[in-house]
Image (cartoon, rainbow, N blue to C red):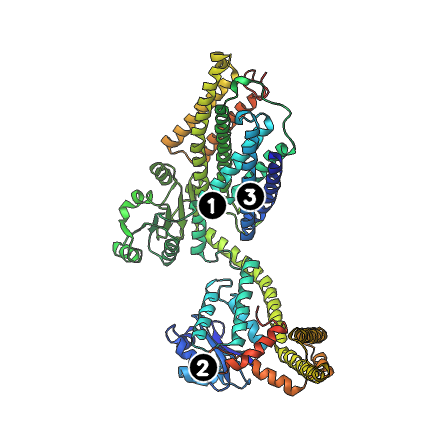
Amino acid sequence: MTLALIGVNYKTAPIELRERIAISREELPETTRALAAVPGVLECMIVSTCNRVELLAAVDSPDADLAGFLHRQFGLDPALLKPHIYERQDRDAVRHLFRVAASLDSMVVGEPQILGQVKEAFAVARASGTVAGQLEHLLQSAFAAAKKVRSDTGIGSNSVSVASVAVDLARKIFGSLAGRAVFLVGAGKMSELAARHLVQQGAGAILVTNRTLARARSMAEPFQGRVIPFEKLYEAASEADIVISSTGAPHPIFRREHGQAFLHRRRNRPMFFIDIAVPRDVDPAMGKLEGIFVYDIDDLQAVASAHLAERSREARDAETLIAAEVERFHQRQRTVNVAPAIVALQRQAEEIRQSELRRAQARLGSLSAEQVAAVEALTRGLMNKFLHPPMQALKQAARENDSTRLDALCEAWSVSASAVQQAETEASPVTAGPDNPETEKAEPRKMNESEAGVETRQ
Amino acid sequence: MYLLWLRVAAILYAAASVAVFPAVLYGLARWRKTCVHLGGMALFFHFVSVIEMLVQAHSWVPVGAREVESLLGLAVAALFFLVWWIYDAISLGIFALPATFFLVFVPALGPDRYTFPSAGVRTSWLVAHIAALLVAYAALCFSLLASVLYLIQERRIKTKPRPGEDSWWAPFEWLPPLDTLERIAHATLEFGFPCMTVGLVIGSVLAQETPLGAAYFLDPKIIAAFVSWVVYVLLLLVRRSAGLRGRKAAYLSGAVFVVVAAVWFANLFSHVHRYGAR
């Protein structure tokens, strides 16, 4: 079985192409099932976000036509899509998935949404019945790796956009933003975005003013804010805890004397001015007043850039961590792969034990139930003790990916290829799936595997 | 037996004091949990120890400086947990937990050899006087601490330090928000005032019972205690009427703390009011 991943993302394809193959939440289950119907695909899932569409599949041969599925499904000319597609297999596919889940492949490295989106895609695939053992194990490992990256590195700890930096600063001043009044002075995309962030964090009343009243109204509408005539700017400002200013005024509209008046009216309650206008709307001298905090666009940008640089440094540590996690996953995978040999070895030993018991029965004569149990326990104990060293050696060789030693061990312990093959057939994750009628047949193997101490899950 | 519980509490406070640093400075949730659990257990054993100690002592009265220290430690720890619970400000633990440990450490070494000599004041009201004043001192300590941290945080935000930059303010990233510090400073100040008032009133009533009677109030230490109370009232009034906050409020809190600390130290020189009263 091979792992195959194919996709397009913001690095390889322009938005015009990405939007043509984007899969909506409603369409995702059906598209995932359609992918599962592609010949050679054993398990599959699809991750579709605004920045990427990726198909991940466990296939029975590397020739399964995933690219063809993309062309057919979205009615795209193969020549148009081909230059934008990337393909990964096995180890590279695992590494890619781990990096995506850990947000190392995101446009804004460390953003937290991607992990949720991968989890959602996995849940959809699971509900559609297109994932079983192989992808289940892979995805759980990817989630664990992503969690480790977030907890062991500072990759997602700081804000990297001007709007979120402003929110962080507001929190440093006011603590909880619940019920804080925000005053938007002037209309601008950036101030709207900052206000949106503040509202998401629980900010209360939104006041909006602009020289053009209609523009102020349209800006206030999404926030259900109150429109203030521009002439009443200074009266209204003292009501606000946070003022976001972005007018096109050529001179500062908030000066030191205004600040003093605000503080007087507010009985010294602090105010935070976010000045994103150029030229600036807030006189820097106002920031010298006790209780008034002024941050202009350069201040905010500087913090955001510093955070971004910090994230890049953390991303290097995260890459090392991901490499280790990928290696760990493969080690586990190899241990799982050696399970059929271990099961075959156990089965062979059990057959020998049973036949020796039958031979000895004639000589032993009639035994009481206790004596039979004692003989059973004795022979089983001996068998397990004898099997322990070769089983450990097999697992060790598998972990170290030492195929020569593996072959030598199988040969030394006379584990026949047919026995391994039989155990492998029973170990196939698809046959062990919950919806498969052969699940019952696979059950005894699972018991043997657990007896052998094989780690199949993290 | 109370010494055993106190020693257990001291060890747990020490462990909590160690755990609070990674919890606050690096924001590590696991350490935070460890710190709260250790501190909580320490507070419990400390409480048990104090109760046993007071039961052993005459009519619940702490009979020496070490026992008073232990009581003050309990007040500081309890107040810290109250502040943490209400304001989610574990950062103050960086100061409160080690301070509590040091307050508990000496009493945990062994009992005072000194016993309170005056039979006239062996009344359970004396413990109320002492406890109320100790809680007031602890509240004032917290108010001052929150005010100082407010000043640092305010200066830090105003200087706009850039993350990763090697500045003097970089180590203070962990400070709680300004508003939280302001509220802690104000709330602890208001909480301490009734405690101090109750403590002084009970003390005055008890003083009447001593052979000195009204002459007791002419002692400089006692006069200073009433002056500190008046300063406290003034501070609260000014804060309320003028909406005083921030830097000026912090300076005033500091002034009150200095006055109250001076009154505390006056115990060492007073002829009528001291632990080792003759």
Labels 2 and 3 within one chain: no
Can you see residue A342? yes
Check disc 3 and report the residue beneath it.
B41
Residue A35 bears which disc, if any?
A: 2
Give x and y (percent) for residue A155: 54, 59
Check disc 1 and report the residue beneath it.
B88
* CA–CA distance in space, label 3 to label 1: 18 Å
Quick one: SS at disc 2? helix
The kind of residue on which mark 1 rests is Asp
Can you see residue A76? no
Left or right of B233, for residue B26:
right
Q: Nearer the viewer, residue B8 or B30?
A: B8
Nearest to the eye among marks 3 and 1: give it.
3
Residue drawn at 54 percent across, 26 percent down: B61
* CA–CA distance in space, label 2 to label 3: 57 Å
The kind of residue on which mark 2 rests is Leu
Disc 2: host chain = A
Q: Are marks 2 and 3 in contact (CB under 8 Å)?
A: no
Residue drawn at 46 percent across, 47 percent down: A172
* CA–CA distance in space, label 2 to label 1: 50 Å
